[in-house]
Image: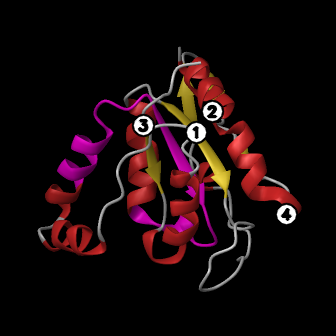
Amino acid sequence: MPKRQIFYSFHFDNDVMRVQQVRNMGVIEGNAAVAPNTWEEVKRKGRASIETWIEDNMKYRSCVVVLIGTETHKREWVKYEMEKAWRDGKGLLGVHIHNLNCPNTGTCTKGNNPFDQFTFRQGGRIVTPVAYDPPANNAYQHIQANLANWVESAISQRN
């Protein structure tokens, strides 16, 4: 199975430590972590700058993986990234990360599925991207063992 290049979408403030765990699994090629200072600089320049940053970083990715924490479904730019991924024909899936242990805050409350806010259409049918919910007792191992297959499935759904 080829190592796919993907784009991670997530709520930075709440979930960055959990996201780093997923990135460090080395299962798939993810987009490089952005430093908080860099993201703040992009945000200060306004909406067009953020949209350009997302466009540039999502450009050659085959799939967008939404890492779902407690507040992810409320985040404007996560919503934008999901819609853009779908418009661009990329694979799209979610992974609940509330059971990954953050060294600062422990686990967190399971967040709402962000895909429930949208109607995704493919051809003449409605399609709902899958949001996986790994078991609490081995969330890390479950994500590590299955992420590559989940990505392939999401890409296949779009082809």
Spatial CA distance of label 4 from label 3 is: 29 Å
Residue for badge 3: 85
Identified by mark 3, the residue type is Ala
Q: List x then y, in percent, for residue 93.
A: 60, 40
Q: Are marks 1 and 2 in contact (CB under 8 Å)?
A: yes
Query: Looking at the rendering, in which quadrant would you find the N terminus?
Result: top right
Q: Residue at x 73, y 76 (%)?
A: 109
Check the image and name the residue furthest to the bottom: 104
Mark 4 or mark 2, which has the lower sequence index?
Answer: 4
Mark 3 vs mark 1, foreground winner is 1
Q: In terms of depth relative to the viewer, which is nearer, 8 or 106?
A: 106
Mark 4 vs mark 3, foreground winner is 4
Q: Are marks 4 and 3 in contact (CB under 8 Å)?
A: no
In the image, is 70 to the left or to the right of 72? right
Q: Is residue 66 above or below residue 75?
A: above
Please provide the residue range marked out in magenta: 51-76
In the image, is 32 to the left or to the right of 53? right
Residue 132 seen in the current view:
no
Residue for badge 2: 148
Q: Is residue 132 magenta?
A: no
Report helix, strand or loop for mark 2: helix
Spatial CA distance of label 1 from label 2 is: 6 Å
